[in-house]
């Protein structure tokens, strides 16, 4: 039996990989050689901009847990609707958007970490 994957499966897999790369680069892993840091996320309700919310929640949770990171991460979703630019779209607006970009910004260095 062959399981068909939708574009959302591919999109989800790519997002998970981008999250992994972002936080592997941010966490000062040398300080935690004898520890394992696991990041588990459950989205209870998607009101829009869920990918950015996930990135922001992970950053806040790691900070709250006292995990040392080389920089602070802030994420935002940006898209276009009818030639206009929309920041932090709702779930309904996401369905109407022509393009969607999830941008993660490193506050201290001023660099873009992830653009999806």
Image: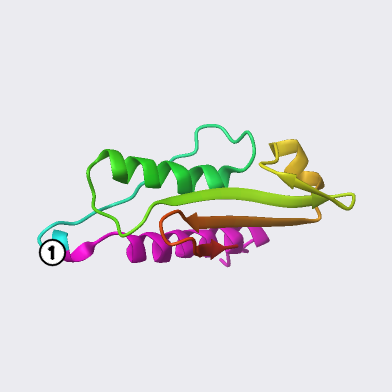
Q: Nearer the viewer, residue 16 or 26?
A: 26
**Quadrant (top left, top right, bottom left, bottom right) of the C terminus:** bottom right
The location of residue 39, given as percent across then percent down, is 33, 50
SS at mark 1 in the image: loop
Q: Which residues are magenta?
A: 1-30
Q: Nearer the viewer, residue 16 or 115?
A: 115
Identity of the residue drawn at 13% across and 64% down = 33
- The secondary structure that most of the magenta stretch takes on is helix
Label 1: how many Cα within 10 Å (few below 14, some 14–19, many 20+) = few
Inspect this view and state whether residue 41 appears: no
Residue 26 lies in the magenta stretch: yes
Identity of the residue drawn at 57% across and 43% down = 50
Inspect this view and state whether residue 59 appears: yes
Identity of the residue drawn at 53% across and 50% down = 75
Find disc 1 in the rendering and name its residue: 33
Residue 45 lies in the magenta stretch: no
Residue 101, above or below 77: below
The location of residue 45, given as percent across then percent down, is 55, 32
Q: Residue furthest right?
A: 82
Can you tell which quarter of the image residue 71 is in? Answer: bottom left
Residue 90, above or below 103: above
The location of residue 101, given as percent across then percent down, is 66, 57
């Amino acid at each position: 039996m062959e399981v068909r994957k939708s574009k959302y499966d591919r999109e989800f897999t790519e997002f998970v990989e981008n999250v992994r790369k972002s936080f592997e680069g941010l966490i000062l892993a040398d300080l935690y050689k004898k520890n394992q840091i696991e990041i588990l996320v459950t989205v209870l309700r998607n009101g829009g901009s869920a990918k950015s919310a996930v990135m922001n929640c992970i950053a806040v949770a790691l900070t709250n847990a006292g995990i040392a990171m080389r920089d602070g991460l802030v994420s935002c979703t940006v898209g276009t609707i009818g030639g206009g630019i929309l920041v932090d779209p709702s779930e309904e607006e996401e369905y109407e958007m022509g393009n969607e970009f999830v941008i993660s910004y490193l506050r201290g260095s001023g660099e873009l970490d992830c653009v999806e």
